[in-house]
Amino acid sequence: MIRHAVLFKWTTEATDEQKTAVAAELTALAPTVPSIRGFVLGPDVGVAAGNFDFAVVADFDDEAGFFAYRDDPAHREVVGRTVTPILAQRVAVQFRY
């Protein structure tokens, strides 16, 4: 299995509505991508200083599944429309488990 973990830090101008839209759009997208085996996301709960603002974790059978998700046109559209406009910083990793 391949786990994809991505963390976002939002711009200071990001509104609560924009942040909520990211979560809603990605949640709605996940069931439409056949290669996703598991998918969770959520905002940081604020218990430690210096954290990123939001996390997405997605699981795939293999690299091909990850690439199918990464390159999925609907995924790219959601990211471009909801994430990119409020994104200050992004980090990601893919690992086997």
Image (cartoon, grey):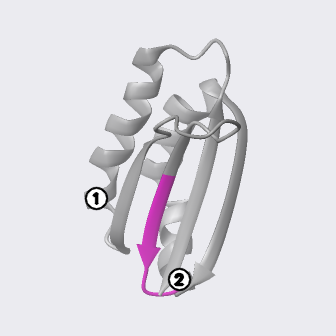
Give the structural element (helix, strand or loop) at label 1: helix
Amino acid identity at mark 1:
Thr
Position of 83 relative to 17 (above/below): below
Magenta part of the protein: which range? 56-62
| Residue for badge 1 | 32
Q: Position of residue 72 (x, y in %)?
A: 48, 59
Q: N-terminal of the two: label 2 or label 1?
A: 1
x then y, percent, for residue 12: 67, 16
Residue at the (48%, 65%) spot, across then down = 69
* Vertical relation: 85 (above or below) 37: above
Q: Position of residue 55 (x, y in %)?
A: 52, 49
User: Alpha carbon of mark 2 to alpha carbon of mark 1: how far?
Assistant: 16 Å
Which amino acid is tagged 2?
A: Ala
Q: Secondary structure at mark 2?
A: helix
Q: Is 61 one of the magenta-colored residues? A: yes
**Above-or-below relation of 5 to 74:** below
Majority secondary structure in the magenta region: strand
Q: Quadrant of residue 70?
A: bottom right
Left or right of 28: which side holds 92? right
The residue that disc 2 covers is 64
Snapshot quadrant of residue 16 = top left
Q: Write the residue at 56% across / 72% down.
A: 67
Who's the residue at 31% across and 47% down the image? Answer: 27
